[in-house]
Amino acid sequence: MAFVVIQFLNGLASAADLFLVSAGLSIIFGVTRIVNFAHGSFYMLGAYLAFTLVEGVVGPALGFWPGIVAAAVAVAILGGLLEVTLLRRIYQAPELFQLLATFGVVLIVQDLVLLVWGPEDRIGPRAPGLEGAVSLLGHQFPRYDLFLIALGPIVLGALFLLFRRTRWGILVRAATQDREMAAALGVNERWLFTSVFVLGAFLAGLGGAVQLPREAVHHTMDLEIIVEAFVVVVIGGLGSVTGAFLASIILAELNAFGIVIFPEVTLVLVFLVMAVVLVIRPTGLLGRPEFAIRAASGVAEPPITPQSEAARNWVFAGVLGLAVLPVVADAYVLSVATEIMIFVLFAISLQFLMGISGMVSFGHAASFGLGAYGAALMIKHAGAPMELAFLAGIGLAALGALVIGWFCVRLTGVYLAMLTLAFAQIAWSVAFQWYGVTGGDNGILGVWPAAWAASPIVFFYLTLAVTTLALVILRRIIFAPFGFGLRACRDSVLRAEAIGIDRRQVQWLGFAVAGAFAGVAGALYAFLKGSVFPDVLAVPVSVDGLVMVLLGGIQRLNGPIVGALVYKLLQIVLASYTDYWRLVIGVIIIGLVVAFPQGIVGFFGTRLDALLVQRRNSP
Amino acid sequence: MRLEVHKLCAFYGRAQILFDVSLKLERGEVVALLGRNGAGKSTTLKSIVGLVEQRSGRVVLDGRDITYAPTAHIARAGLGYVPEDRRIFTELTVAENLLVGRQAPRPGAPAWTEKSLFHLFPNLAELSDRPAGEISGGEQQMLTIARTLMGNPAALMLDEPSEGLAPLIVEQLGKAILTLKQQGLSILLSEQNLHLARAIGDRVSIIEKGRIRFEGTMAEFAGDQTISRMFLAV
């Protein structure tokens, strides 16, 4: 019994920082409608800055408590600067581009942290006055954890007062519900947005800082916390601070008890709880009805039409050009070209999911990775030939997408997107932790193609053939009745259902199709690299896909091809020149979002359209 | 406060909704903007306060060009807007809704307080602490006007305030709007309810399919039955 109580208190203590981060994320989203990926970066910066300020690595040591507060304030200021310099420019852009820009910030901060603090873990000091442990029911319980347990409710209470008792808080609540109306009443949005961002960043920074005496500070804590925070926000309901509080306790308790009772299934538990909550309450425990995520630019998009003769010829010429590439290129160039084609396929499958089916995924890596693991596992454990393993990869990806999709089609918008991310992260953890089967972070080696396909030239042609075929099939699907059904559901669920389309069924199948094709890409990738590591399931792969699709323009059929080509090439070239390629890519992503809010192909396409109209109209 | 609209055009996507709409609202005057459903009344008002993104033309408020000013700045310049669909902050209480609209008093415009607004709309006084989502449609309509008045506007745009309200409430509302007129507010009233428009309007503009088709005094409009038959009859 005593043990249960202690473990419960442990859970409460680790809920504190999760709550701080999730609350900030939720508040920022509520008002600005920005899903701030960089919120995990604020958390990480809070931890590193606290480490530096408390210890006085540069400048005077502030001591523990002033150092913690100073770190949170510093992060708040950084958040404000970010809002004023970057986000303000892109509030008019589609939400997904804003998301992309904040992910650019994530990449930049990751490299800056490496540059400033180095790759080693940093261990913070104990909190003065709260060192050691108290005796509780015969167990030793850290004093500092008692402070953390109190911190959560204190912050919740403070936020409650802030939002109920101050004019600022009332304005924030008003703007969360109807930002246009608030503006029409003279509420200055700019100032409100900046201040909300500052508050959110402060909470995240504080969350990172108070964690200092508990856990080592390291440079992957940003993505770890943001994924957990997404889960919290999905369970608790977007825009609800109390919901975030409840959900972070639920999540932390599941972890606390899961780890001691069944360490292997902790994640499954978390996932089950989330699934149950979402099936019963699709907007989370205390969420508002719905926050739609606008994938398109808000302006009515011209409907997708079959390609013109000219465009078809260009694609054909591109395939022909690739076919003669092995004549001139060496093995390295061929492997780069093969990799790019694989990511073209991956990006196309994601566009099918987002652009055609209208389901935004932050976790498409799950399908890619399952494809890769399906193939690799088949080879490792069954000694299967490449062809069979390849099919197994597609099968596993399709199966995974069916499971994930079953939950996801019950949601829409941001909730759906965050759920996909959570699922991808679960898949990643399974691959990472299940040493017996997946080899954990040692990966699976020796996933080579069959003898006939072993030469880089043959594998290049194989990839070209598979990618082209997959592309043709996807096009067929888009212009088949099923594809029209998907687009109908995307544009208006109500009208689609009114004419007899079973929305969930159609979207579920769409999800599975997109997953299967991503699985094809993943299986090809496994054979190209000869190995599979948990990285193929990780957040960066999902985000790479998003970047490619969005850069290309989500509503342009050929967009992802251009997007994948440009982005992957950039990544490969940069990685060969500098260790800090994330920094450069981050800056480039932000630059592109600010310069081309419609995507590259969208940007030039719109101008081309305008030119054509002009020419047609001029005598 | 004087409001001038010159050749206002507005678009939703590729569809043009307004075609060279011009309007004039003199100080202390009530102009009724009449038209059938979908004629462009709401879009006109929305475009004036900058809530329609794609627009062209010129909007001048007391000599100041506000065509491309941010919505909040337009509101702060003294132009109050009461939307058609009320857009009450349903999660806030009645009193909190009023607080959102509060601005500093403006020279040359009546200064409102929560108390004086409760005097104008007595029903609201007892509802002060109720969540605004729980009050009736008529009460919400009063609240949305009161909320905009908390900004002490010098000119007011009302978008179909009588829509969906019981006749008794419409009468009450008409009295309140008349009070505002007597206090010297310039009012642009978009309406389908001819009765209400006749009772308080000085001049009339009729909009049809995004174009202004008639402009004149209330007397001219009332004297010529063909006008209303042509542009307003269903």
Image: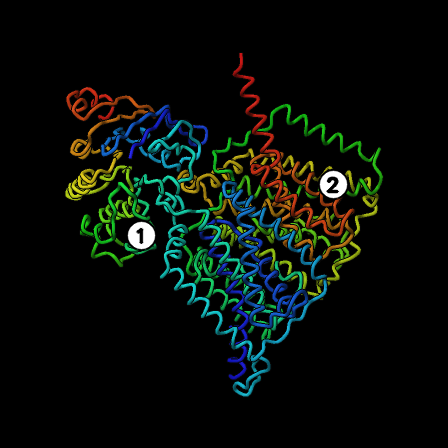
Q: Residue at x 49, y 48 (%)?
A: A413
Label 1, secondary structure: give it.
helix
Indicate left or right for B115 with A114 as reference. left
Q: CA distance from mark 2 to mark 1?
A: 61 Å
Chain that bears disc 1: B
- Kindly identify the amino acid type of the residue bearing the numbered disc 2: Thr
Q: Is residue A398 visible from the viewing direction of this image?
A: no
Q: Is residue A361 visible from the viewing direction of this image?
A: yes
Between disc 2 and disc 1, the foreground one is 1
Q: Residue at x 49, y 68 (%)?
A: A250
Residue B40 position in % (x across, y down) = 33, 30
Question: Considering only vertical position in the picture, is A454 above or below A373?
Answer: above
- The tag on residue B97 is 1
- Kindly identify the amino acid type of the residue bearing the numbered disc 1: Asn
The residue at which mark 2 appears reads as: A463
Question: Considering only vertical position in the picture, is B204 above or below A370?
Answer: above
Indicate left or right for A111 with A485 as reference. right
